[in-house]
Image: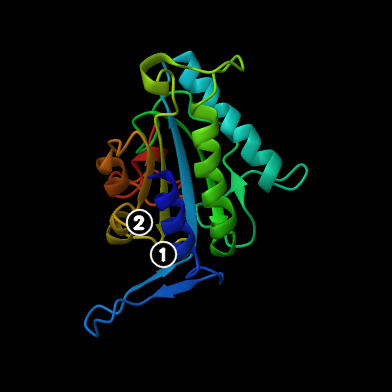
Amino acid sequence: MRILLLIAVLLFSTAFSDDKMHIANGDVASPGVDIYCFHIHVYFMQGNKASTARALDLRRRFISRFLPENGAPCTHEVTVDRPCVWEHPNMVPAGPHTYGSWGASLPNSYYDRVIPWVIQNQVIINATGVDGGKNQVCEDQHGAIAGILVHPLTADRGKDTRESRKLDHQLVMWTGQGKLPLDFDFLYYNDYDCDTCDPNHCTQACK
């Protein structure tokens, strides 16, 4: 199963090589979507020390592998020039994420390098105890990373809409223990990168 998933990822990734990629579906009335970049969200059970430690270990490995030395954290949802991680992990559920999480953004050209690496390292980390020993409890699921979500961003910076945010989270890939719930109300009421309180479009900036 893991091998088939990696093959699917590699085949899918061949379509993404430019800063913006158009994915056509062959329907003149519905010509497809543009993809500007991808997001990765790594989820952990915030009340479980082992799950949290594994997820943060994957974050450290990701930064070491893909970010330049002293690479700046993400500042916008859409990043087309470099991979980045958001500065601080969410140690409690935040935004649309109903688990603790950390996130990264990557240009389309990094997809085929990053996504297979993330999946492989998720398997390695989950199969190894946080103290370096093999974890044999509950078929290696004790304290595992809760899941990983990969989704595209289909609107350019500052041009997202409720429809584009909905589409972003329909065109997804889940790895790990399966699909986890998202708070779609948050996505409905919050534009990406908004910083001015608006009850209809930016509740995340309201105090």
Q: Amino acid at mark 1?
A: Ala
Query: What residue is drawn where x is 30% and y is 76%?
Result: 25
Q: Amino acid at mark 2?
A: Asp
- Judged from this view, the residue extending furthest toward the bottom is 28
Numbered mark located on residue 80 in the image? none
Query: What residue is drawn where x is 47% and y is 72%?
Result: 21
- Dot 2 falls on a residue whose secondary structure is helix
- Dot 1 falls on a residue whose secondary structure is loop
Residue 161 point in image, percent of width and height: 33, 60
Q: Please state which of the two labelled residues, at mark 1 or mark 2, is closer to the viewer.
A: 2
Asked if 113 appears above or below 141 in the picture, the reply is below
- The residue where tag 2 is placed is 168
Residue 33 point in image, percent of width and height: 36, 71
Asked if 59 appears above or below 113 in the picture, the reply is above
The answer to whether the residue labelled 1 contacts the one labelled 2, judged by CB atoms less than 8 Å apart, is yes
Residue 55, visible in the rendered structure: no
Mark 1 / mark 2, whichever is N-terminal: 1
Quarter of the picture containing the N terminus is: top left
Residue 84, visible in the rendered structure: yes
